[in-house]
Image (tube, helix red, strand yellow):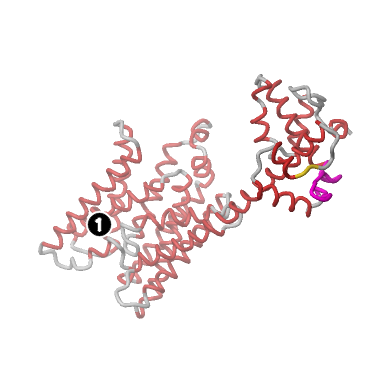
Amino acid sequence: MGGNFTWVMIGCALIGAGASAVGVFSFLRKQALVGDAVAHALLPGVVLAFMFTGQKDIWILFPGAFVAGWLGLLSIDFISKNSKIKPDTAIAIVLTVFFAVGIVLLTHVQQSNYGNQSGLEAFLFGKAAAMLPADITLFVAVDAALILLIVLTYHYLKLYSFDPDFAKAIGLPVKGIQFILSSLTVLAVASGIQAVGVVLMAALIITPAAAARFFTGRLSHMIILAMIIGIISSLIGVYISSLALSMPTGPWIVMVLSIIAIMAFVFAPGKGMLQRSRKRKAHQEKVRRENLLKLFYSLGEKNEHLFYSRPQLLRSRRFQGKELELLLSRMTKKGLLLRKENRYGLTTTGRSEATRVVRLHRLWELYLNERMNIAPDHVHHDAEAIEHIITPELERELLKDLGYPELDPHSSKIPGIKDMQR
């Protein structure tokens, strides 16, 4: 790229920042495919602008792309409102029809005697190397317009993006907000066609927002993080594409963006796949542990024995042999169980924990029976599922609501009620 390299880096970073900021609102409104449809709808506008002017200047092609993008959005809206076709089908129709028209026009230009038409096909996949210093002015203007509109209408956009029905109910100008969001989307997409191309521009709109969502739930933080991801992806993509001759910039930007997004999906704290897998396994372990504690408690209620062998436990509740052996070993190490020869019994800590779980189970059974009018013989399985996730706060509310009861719907004693009243 030579001396143009710096301008390309700046231009792509500006495009990445603007598209990512706008993409957050498309992502939250679950309109990821709209950005893709708008991007593909830009192509006929670009080619027509060239056919009328004979110029490939981005300042000339940009208005054509903007108008075509808006026509694409209006077409989606018109088809959805005036037919039985669902919005996703309308998006697919507009995307394919506009793109097909663009390809036909592009082929016509390439086979005709239009001067200066060479390189027009680069708008399909982007050609950042064609960027000129004068183009940066356009990107700065677009980014300034996008950020200014977002800042000025932030609270309206936030309300509408998270709950459009509530925004309408409190009297917000919903149609005006929709117009602003649509204009932001078309502006952002149209500004990036030179660098990324109409085929891949949708990725720059949605992917940074999707990756940012894994790290934060606050809209302001999500916008900033998406912009940072968009900028970093653009800079790295431009750098990689500069290492080899004729290497396309747009696909590399999307490649880097995809890698960042995949890393976020897998490793993000809290919402990443690994973290969620750890939480799921920890919950399953907790459920198995509490079920075994309940079993010890129930066996203790039925007879006077305090210690039980593995065969006795297996006969009383459905456990896998190895699963039970592993569970007994872990609970013994945690101090919940005591082993005497080949038999196991509850320790003081284990009995306290077992009392809590049994109390929660029977309280929820009573709540379902008394408050939800569910028959006593139908409450057990629901209580089995809920008892493991009842918090201490919810337990206190249950006790107050039920008046600190002593018996469950099956006339079994609810343990530990006196201790909870203190």
Farthest residue in the left direction?
113
Where does residue 45 sit, x and y in percent of width and height?
A: 25, 53
| Residue 198, position as x, y percentages in the image | 31, 57
Q: Quadrant of the C terminus?
A: top right
x 29%, y 31%: residue: 83
Name above or below for residue 19 compared with residue 249: above
Vertical position of residue 129 compared to residue 360: above or below? below
Give the residue displayed 32% in from the left and 69% down from the top.
248
> Where, quadrant-wise, is the N terminus in this rendering?
bottom left
- Residue positioned 52% across, 54% down in the render: 223
- The magenta stretch is 336-351
Where is residue 129? Give x, y as percent.
Answer: 32, 72
Pinpoint residue 297: horizontal percent, then vertical percent. 79, 37
Residue 357 in the figure: left or right of residue 269: right
Is residue 197 left or right of 287 when viewed as pictured?
Answer: left
Taking the image as shown, residue 317 lies to the left or right of residue 151, namely right
Relative to 146, does residue 250 appear above or below in the rendering? below
Q: Which residue is mark 1?
A: 46
Check residue 193 for magenta coloring. no
Tell which of 137 and 378 is nearer to you: 378
